[in-house]
Image (cartoon, helix red, strand yellow):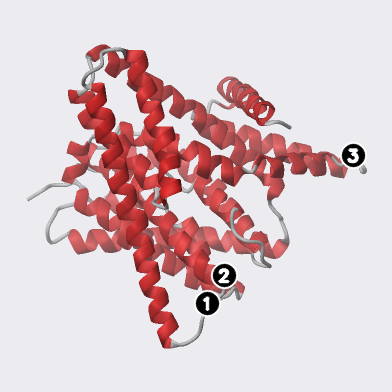
Amino acid sequence: MTLLQIASLLIVLAGAFGAINYLVFKLPSAIGILVVSLLASLILMGLDFVIPGLNVADTIRAQVVGIEFSDALLEGMLGLLLFAGALHVKTSDLRKEWLTVTLMATMGIAISTAIVGYGFAWITGMPILVALVFGALISPTDPVAVMGVLRETNLSKSLETKIAGESLFNDGVGYVVYLILVGTAFTGASHGAEAHDSGLIAAGELFLREAVGGAALGLFLGFITFRIMRHIDDYSLEVLLTLGLAFGGYELAVALGVSAPIMAVCAGLLIGDVGTRLGMSEETRKYVEAFWKLIDEILNAVLFLMIGVEVFAVVFDTSFVLAGGAAIILGLFARFMAVAIPITILRPFRSYSGGVIRIMTWGGLKGGISVALALSLPDSEWKPMILTATYMVVVFSIIVQGLTVARLANNVNPQSSLIP
């Protein structure tokens, strides 16, 4: 199938499954599309057992593998989704919560990666470095899933900013950690203290180049775009400029070897706050916000559809399924620790309501980014188990946690954190 045919099919299916969900299941839009696509995929897989020799699953599996989900998300959709998500987070709100967001996106990722990695290695017998790669790809919360759920909740502005800000930044940080660990685990590690030290130095340099470089590029490109928009009063052209910033900036970041996700987030934050306030007319602001909200909704629908059909790429061996079940529990515990430790450290300096840890733990949804990273792993004997476990964690997170976190949040009803 050509790229245009694949894109057309995905949009048609997303629309059809969205309509089925709206008329029958009445679940939140993105989650409903995932549920319908997953049910449709399982039904098609079941046809091979009912009618031997039909080989429907094998035919569809070949098409699904051909879509290259990992490339489509990491090199295509992710920049637009992150830019759209960041566009609606105000830097003035984020500035008040910067310390919590920073610790959650750095210390939290490190804690979760270590807990999941060592725990999964102990459960499965997987080499520790490979298990840490699994920990790195499953630890970041997915901004696409998280932002979708936030629309269904009635959280305080402070808590909403913590959750949204963390999901936007820990995604980029987690991706950098993943790249470092993959390079160590799958390309062969040298032995000896000197090699170990040089490896740590190289990893530190890579992290700084990716994270700091991505942030600097995003702010620079966002500022240039903002300055241009100040001299223009044409909403269609200004919408086009923001689209060019998201597309072109992401590809430039990839070419320069800096973090493209962090670039997209920083550029989106600058345009969404400074750009909308000082660089756009009221009419332009309405069109820009409406355009990016629509882009967000459409890509969200397509992404959750793709997650549903990726079940064809998963191997449901009994041992893999058991490992996936253990990974769900391990991931929830790691998420709890990744939230509780930074907040406990900050409690002497700030006050938090009692529900913050519970909401942020259960609201730390995983999503398509984790599946894409698992699919992009180099081929090895452990890749099928990692992919199955990742898929099970993501589906559980989106369906179970995604459908219940709003109820939990509204029952707990946490108040905004207090700044002394």
Residue at position x 21%, y 21% from top? 230
Viewer-proximal residue among 382 and 78: 78
**Looking at numbered disc 1 in the image, what kind of residue is underneath it?**
Ala
Q: Which residue is mark 2?
A: 187
Give residue 291's quadrant in the image. Answer: top left
- Per the image, label 1 sits on a secondary structure element best described as loop
Q: Is residue 188 above or below residue 329?
A: below
**Looking at numbered disc 2 in the image, what kind of residue is underneath it?**
Thr
Residue at position x 58%, y 44% from top? 71
Seen as rendered, the residue at the extreme bottom is: 192
Q: Residue 36 appears at what percent x and percent y?
A: 63, 32
Residue at position x 23%, y 62% from top? 344
Residue at position x 67%, y 45% from top? 311
Residue 160 visible: no
Q: Is residue 275 above or below residue 374?
A: above
Q: Residue 405 appears at what percent x and percent y?
A: 41, 42
Viewer-proximal residue among 228 and 359: 228
- Per the image, label 2 sits on a secondary structure element best described as loop
- Per the image, label 3 sits on a secondary structure element best described as loop
